[in-house]
Amino acid sequence: MTRLSTFDKALLNLLQGDIPICSHPFAQLASRLGTDEDTVLARLRELKAAGFLRRIGTFFDSNQLGYRGTLVALKVKPSQLQAVAEAVNRYPGATHNYEREGLYNLWFTLLTPNADCEKKILSEIRSLDGVEDMLKLKANKKYKINVQFKLQ
């Protein structure tokens, strides 16, 4: 699949910020789109398989839930970059893991319930083969950008 249908675009628009909080959210989305729940779920599976959709989930205010966030920059040997990225991705609190140009070439955010958990995870990541250095960058102020792509 290389092109999105009008239905796909409408579905993806709804998913970006209008998923109902109820026992059958996809049935409600289907009703709004003039179809049935099975069709919506089938299209979502196909869109995910084709790479148009990475994940479906909610955003919570992590601070209100008692979690602490840290931006982490790693200096990783290029030959180990993929393996380190995959290892980081296995931690449930690791998000936004991406490669960057420059000395510190792998960046991710980490959400943890307390300082001890953060320290343990970062110690494990720091000891991975290929990790040469780590910067832990605590936020002084939180900025939340709500990016939504309105598909026509």
Image (cartoon, helix red, strand yellow):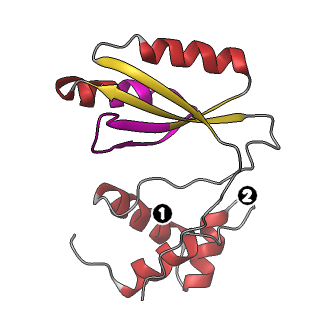
* Residue tagged 1: 41
Query: Is 72 displayed left or right of 115 in the figure?
Result: left
Q: Is residue 66 above or below residue 149?
A: above
Q: What mark, if any, has residue 23 been given in the picture?
A: 2
Please name whichever residue, 64 or 25, is drawn nearer the observer in this view of the structure: 64
Please name whichever residue, 44 or 121, is drawn nearer the observer in this view of the structure: 121
State how far apart marks 1 and 2 are (Cα).
Answer: 15 Å
Q: Residue at x 26, y 29 (%)?
A: 81
Q: Residue at x 25, y 78 (%)?
A: 3
Counting residues from the start of the chain, the first of labels 1 and 2 encountered is 2
Q: Position of residue 83 (x, y in %)?
A: 27, 25
Element carrying mark 1 = helix
The span shown in magenta is: 85-108
Query: Is 101 displayed left or right of 29 in the figure?
Result: left
Query: Is 12 displayed left or right of 129 in the figure?
Result: right
Q: Quadrant of the C terminus?
A: bottom left
**Kind of residue at badge 1:** Leu
Is residue 97 located in the magenta-colored stretch of the structure? yes
Q: Position of residue 54 (x, y in %)?
A: 41, 54
Q: Quadrant of the N terminus?
A: bottom left
Q: Quadrant of residue 18?
A: bottom right
Q: Position of residue 102 (x, y in %)?
A: 28, 40
Element carrying mark 2 = loop
Please name whichever residue, 90 or 95, is drawn nearer the observer in this view of the structure: 95
Q: Quadrant of residue 133?
A: top left
How many dots with numbers?
2
